[in-house]
């Protein structure tokens, strides 16, 4: 991370500066770097804001810059695209079997984000961004991570006020003080321990488990496996007539052409939302059965405080509410984290609502 890297750079730079005069005198080569030369090379940004150039950038400008420079690899909202990594999300996954390390879940300081974007991004065109553009992109990343509001402007004066969630997950590497002295001792070169002799072999001790035991470590016991007598009878497998409810009737009366048009418009939503069989929560909640459902009630999804307030007010996703939200998400539910400016076309919104309605189960 930037703190460690900057410490290395600073130490290495100090070592080089100290060595240059001696080399110059001994070999007659080179000269001491001028202060302005060092300043031009040293672009490191520290956690306390040291090294930040004056400048500013807001979330809305950052969104435009992100779409133009970053979205092709990292997705429209930082969720990742193809083989490229996501930038946000992943909170609470660091102890999982497949942790997701992002700005939101892993990086320690906002200076790390600023420093990395400034040094290395966009991919293939590093250091082509202006200072204000870097501020705006970092502001958009912070917004996408739910750390700031959509009207936030980041600058060199308020920079240290935005703290990343996992800052407390890092600590200073004190091994040189705490561990190295304990293990530092003269190496033993002879007669370092009791002689070793082989007294038995694994085959003699019969410690290798049989195949069924290994199998049961990873699968349920064969005795618990279902048998033919557990299979449902043919009578039980006959589908029972169920009364056709109102929702099924609504789906049946949808205009197939309008639903198809909505499926085409769904491309701007699928980056964050899933719908249909097997849909899961991602950057946004899955949207099966959304029509006439209460706002903010999809199981397992972490909603923003703004959505939680809308849910407490009793807001429901009827057609009128869906239309208003699709047109202007921030207007209907202010300060929500959905970084999407809306669908301006009323016909396109109607098609999207028809497509959402077609996924009522």
Image (cartoon, rainbow, N blue to C red):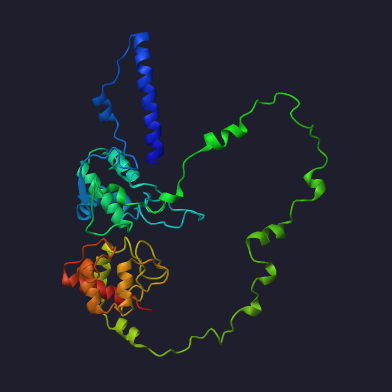
Horizontally, residue 172 falls left or right of residue 293, namely right
Where is residue 293, by image quadrant?
A: bottom left
Quadrant where the image shows the N terminus: top left
Nearest the viewer among 13 and 303 is 13
- Count the labels in the image: 0
**Residue 159 vertical position relative to residue 261 in the rendered view, above or below:** above
Residue drawn at 80 percent across, 50 percent down = 206
Q: Nearer the viewer, residue 133 or 98?
A: 133
Left or right: 31, with 193 as reference point: left
Residue depicted at x 21% and y 58%: 151
Residue 22 picture quarter: top left
Residue in view at x 28 percent, y 63 percent = 338
Q: In the image shown, does 250 or 190 lie closer to the viewer?
A: 190
Q: Residue 188 falls in which quadrant of the image? A: top right
Q: Quadrant of the C terminus?
A: bottom left
- From this view, report whether residue 111 is shown above or below residue 64: above
Q: Position of residue 70 (x, y in %)?
A: 27, 48
Q: Position of residue 308 (x, y in %)?
A: 33, 71
Q: Position of residue 143 (x, y in %)?
A: 29, 56
| Vertical comparison of 200 with 254: above or below | above
**Position of residue 321 in the picture relative to residue 211 (left or right):** left
x and y, in percent, of residue 358 in the image: 31, 76
């Amino acid at each position: 991370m930037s703190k460690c890297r900057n410490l290395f750079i600073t130490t290495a730079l100090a070592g080089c500066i100290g060595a240059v005069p001696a080399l110059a005198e001994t070999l007659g080569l080179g000269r001491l770097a001028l202060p302005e030369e060092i300043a031009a090379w040293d672009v490191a940004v520290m956690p306390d804001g040291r090294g930040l150039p004056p400048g500013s950038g807001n979330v809305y400008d950052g969104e435009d810059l992100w779409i133009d420079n970053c979205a092709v690899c990292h997705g429209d909202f930082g969720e990742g695209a193809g083989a490229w990594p996501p930038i946000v999300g992943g909170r609470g996954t660091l102890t999982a079997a497949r942790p997701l390390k992002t700005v939101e879940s892993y990086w320690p300081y906002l200076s790390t984000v600023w420093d990395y974007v400034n040094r290395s991004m966009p991919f293939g065109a590093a250091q082509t961004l202006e200072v204000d553009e870097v501020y705006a992109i970092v502001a958009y990343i912070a917004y996408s991570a739910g750390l700031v509001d959509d009207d936030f402007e980041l600058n060199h004066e308020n920079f240290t006020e935005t703290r990343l969630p996992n800052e407390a997950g890092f600590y200073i590497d004190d091994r040189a003080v705490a561990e190295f002295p304990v293990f530092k001792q003269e190496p033993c070169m002879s007669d370092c321990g009791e002689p070793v002799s082989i007294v038995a072999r694994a085959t003699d001790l019969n410690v290798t488990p049989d195949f069924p035991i290994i199998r049961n470590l990873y699968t349920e016991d064969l005795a618990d496996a279902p048998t033919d007598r557990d299979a449902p009878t043919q009578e039980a497998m006959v589908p029972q007539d169920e009364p056709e409810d109102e929702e099924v009737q609504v789906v049946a009366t949808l205009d197939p052409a309008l639903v198809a048009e909505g499926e085409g418009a769904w491309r701007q939503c699928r980056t964050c939302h899933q719908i249909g069989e097997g849909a899961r929560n991602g950057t946004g909640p899955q949207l099966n059965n959304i029509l006439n459902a209460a706002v903010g009630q999809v199981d397992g999804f972490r909603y923003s405080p703004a959505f939680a307030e809308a849910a407490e007010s009793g807001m429901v996703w009827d057609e009128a509410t869906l239309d208003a939200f699709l047109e202007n998400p921030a207007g209907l539910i202010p300060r929500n984290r959905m970084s999407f400016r809306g669908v301006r076309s009323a016909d396109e919104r109607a098609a999207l609502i028809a497509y959402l309605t077609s996924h009522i189960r």
